[in-house]
Image (cartoon, grey):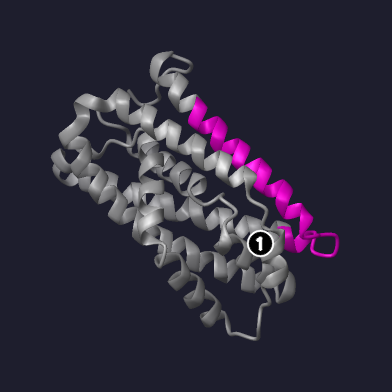
Amino acid sequence: MGLGFLDVLFRGICVGVAASITVGPVAVLCIQRTLSKSRRSGIISGLGVACADTFMAMAALFFYSILQAQIEQYDTLLRVVAGICVVVFGVYIFSQNPVPQIRRNRAGKTSLWQDFASMFGLTIANFIMVVPYILTFFAIFEISGSDMTTNGFAGFLQAVLTIAGFLGGSMVWWTLLACVINLFRRRFRPRHMLTINHVAGLIIGILGVYTILSTFFDIFPNVGY
């Protein structure tokens, strides 16, 4: 049975948040602008990332709907592979040290529009790396691409709600990040980014492990089925 619309929206939000919590170069730049310029600059920069990620999520969902219809019989294998990939991402994020990059970056005097456009362009430039990353989270949160291709208008609405949820989740994450950094800006030190990386890496890694285990063990009942 297909997912309820609210469930689809919630899963889209989860994918948007999960795909955004990595502390990579774009996150470092958003934090740097929040610290050196203003909270508004950090938020607008984050929204540029969220919009770019949403465009790539649309592409990922399109490919996912096609792939899922073809390889639905390999659902278990797909979830295990996705879980392993996410664990690897988590370990990679955990091991990264963003402190040197923060110290190298210097935010110049730019308008809010330039802040948005620069982050949008930088994120889109990583299209080849980001789309597979988003795909793994579509698999982990069990968003059904086959329902979207076979259920007519209802399937189209599910796709719209998934992307809307993704955008909303991503925007909430970047806005929250800028507000929190701005709140503690006087006490914030570059080394604190290392802690954020460790926490983000652990969360993503645990999510990957949970996905692998839940494939073989009924840890929690599936919602919406």
Q: Which residue is mark 1?
A: 178
- In this rendering, the answer to whether 210 lies above or below 38 is above
Screen quadrant of the N terminus = top left
**Where's residue 163, x and y in %?**
35, 52
**Where's residue 8, x and y in %?**
36, 39
Q: Nearer the viewer, residue 187 or 101?
A: 101
Q: Residue at x 27, y 26 (%)?
A: 75
Q: Is residue 158 left or right of residue 71?
A: right
The outermost residue toward the right is 187
Q: Which residues are magenta?
A: 181-209
* Magenta run includes residue 53: no
**Where's residue 63, x and y in %?**
24, 48
Q: Nearer the viewer, residue 94 or 38?
A: 94
Q: Is residue 113 left or right of residue 29?
A: left
* Residue type, mark 1 in image: Ala
Q: Nearer the viewer, residue 111 or 3?
A: 111
**Where's residue 224, x and y in %?**
36, 26
Q: Residue at x 71, y 54 (%)?
A: 193
The outermost residue toward the top is 217
- In this rendering, the answer to whether 99 lies above or below 141 is below
Q: Residues within 10 Å of mark 1 (few under 14, many from 20)?
A: many
Q: Nearer the viewer, residue 168 or 191?
A: 191
| Residue 204 visible in the snapshot | yes
At mark 1, the secondary structure is helix
| Residue 141 visible in the snapshot | no
Q: Main secondary structure of the magenta part?
A: helix
When asked about the image quadrant of residue 69, the answer is top left
- In this rendering, the answer to whether 160 lies above or below 111 is above
Q: Residue at x 44, y 32 (%)?
A: 84
Q: Residue at x 48, y 16 (%)?
A: 219
When asked about the image quadrant of residue 136, the answer is top left
